[in-house]
Amino acid sequence: MENKSKIVKIVVFVPETHANAVREAIGKAGAGKLGNYACCSFSSKGIGRFRPQKGAHPNIGEVGKLESVAEERIEAVCERDKLTDVVKAIKEAHPYEEVALDIYPLEAI
């Protein structure tokens, strides 16, 4: 029998220009709940780098050219049963054609 954690951590990388919109979408979809607190998240800043390939339709940058973008890494916890809705909300609020998104199971302590 598979034992899945009930809580996961979602990590998404987003241009700084859209970070507030993505954070808001995450909270409205139900992620970021810690006890009696809602919309909890953590952000750190960095540089995202990518080269759009043939067939891409980049929101930022040009096909074939390396691009660097000031981005935020946004982290929030999420109940597994809300995960599908939260991922959908992130993708709707995110400006990129391909969203860099990680989901980690969390151990109960």
Image (spheres, rainbow, N blue to C red):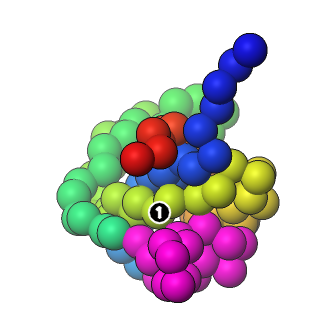
User: Quick one: label 1, few (<14), some, or many (20+) residues within 10 Å?
Assistant: many
> From the viewer's perspective, is residue 97 above or below residue 72?
above
Residue 12 locus on image (x, y percent): 47, 54
- Relative to 93, residue 108 above or below: above
The local secondary structure at tag 1 comes to: strand
Magenta-drawn stretch contains 55 = no
Horizontal side, residue 19 vs residue 69: left or right: right
27 in relation to 85, above or below: below
- Going by the numbered disc 1, the residue's amino acid type is Ala
Q: Is residue 9 left or right of residue 91?
A: left
Quadrant in the rendering for residue 64: top left
Q: Going by the picture, which residue comes out furthest to the front?
A: 109
Res 102 seen here:
no
Q: Where 40 sits versus 105, above or below? A: below
Relative side of 1 to 75, left or right: right
Q: Which residue is mark 1?
A: 76
Image-based side of 75 in relation to 100, left or right? left
Residue at 60% from the left image edge and 77% from the top image edge = 27
21 drawn magenta: yes
* Residue 56 coordinates in the image, percent (x, y): 61, 39
Over which residues does the magenta segment extend? Answer: 19-41
The N terminus - image quarter: top right
Which residue appears at 60% of the width and 67% of the height? 31
**Residue at x 76%, y 52% (from the top left corner):** 81
Q: Nearer the viewer, residue 103 or 80?
A: 80
Front-lying residue, 102 or 97: 102
